[in-house]
Amino acid sequence: MTRNKQDYLKIIYELGGNINPVNNKDIASALGVSPPSVSEMIKKLLEEGYLEYTPYKGIKLTDYGIKEASKIVRKHRLWEVFLINHLGYSWDEVHDEAEKLEHVTSSQLEKRLQEYLNFPKACPHGSLIPYSEEDVDSTPYRSLDTLKEGEKAVIKRVTDKKPLLKYLMHLGLAIGDEISIINLAPYNGPITLIKQDKKIIIGKEASELIYVE
């Protein structure tokens, strides 16, 4: 399989296409490519049995597509764990490096990497690592922006986007943090929360990309 096809399967998986239909617009935005390029590749992946199409809804991964996408996602997230735990990378740096490594990782190397890391459950951004082609990214976490004043929660996962990760590092927020909402500004204004007696104000747009339990 070409690297380009692998990138498409992985992003469709990460957009939730292993569970619900996703549209071409979201795929184009996530990959930073033109809509015609997406349409062309989607057509190929449909013909090859990786995807199925539902009119007026979008495309989903088939069981075969989930199996192949899981392999790519697993390698990517394992390398992210390795880079942070053993080479001192920060969580906003690992994505680009793991993106390169996932495409050149053999099955044997992947197996040894799993064993060396003692089969980690999640990547540094909180996304579960799929083993044995399992469909794992269906955990019903809530996004931070859905919490009400007074609610408490634990940050479980964040969207893997470098600007967001840098922003959260600046704010001092990370996976596993316990937070409490103390104020919701009107008209889609910022959210004020408390973390260990520290008051933090976070933008509404960013809060939509943070998932809590």
Image (cartoon, helix red, strand yellow):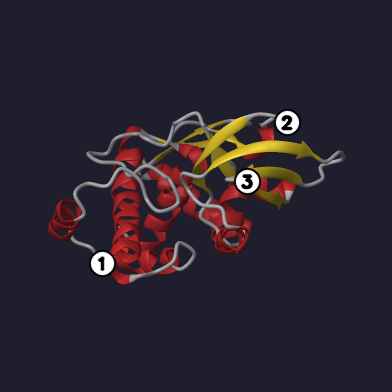
Which residue in the protein does label 1 denote? 104
Residue mark closest to the camera, 2 vs 1: 2
Query: Which residue is depicted at the point 31% across and 41% down?
Result: 130
How dense is the environment of label 2, judged by Cα within 10 Å: few (below 14), some, or many (20 and up)?
some
Q: Residue furthest front?
A: 197
Mark 3 and mark 1: Cα distance apart in space? 45 Å
Return the disc, 3 or 2, that comes first in the chain's sequence. Answer: 2
Mark 2 and mark 1: Cα distance apart in space? 47 Å
Q: Quadrant of residue 135?
A: top left
Q: Horizontal placement of 184 versus 60: left or right?
A: right
Return the disc, 2 or 1, that comes first in the chain's sequence. Answer: 1
Say which amino acid is labelled 2. Answer: Glu
Q: Is mark 3 on a helix, strand or loop?
A: loop
The quadrant the N terminus occupies is: bottom left
**Residue 71, image x, y percentages:** 28, 48
> Front-most of 192 and 91?
192
Which residue in the protein does label 2 denote? 149
Answer whether residue 44 is visible to the viewer in this image: yes
**Residue 78, image x, y percentages:** 29, 55
Q: Horizontal placement of 132 versus 74: left or right?
A: left
Answer whether residue 208 is visible to the viewer in this image: no
How dense is the environment of label 1, judged by Cα within 10 Å: few (below 14), some, or many (20 and up)?
few
Say which amino acid is labelled 1. Answer: Val
Return the disc, 3 or 1, that comes first in the chain's sequence. Answer: 1
Query: Which residue is depicted at the point 32% across and 53% down?
Result: 72
> Front-most of 180 and 27?
180
Say which amino acid is labelled 3. Answer: Asp
Label for residue 197?
Answer: 3
Query: Which residue is depicted at the point 63% across and 36% down?
Result: 180
Label for residue 26?
Answer: none
Query: Which residue is depicted at the point 59% across and 42% down?
Result: 23
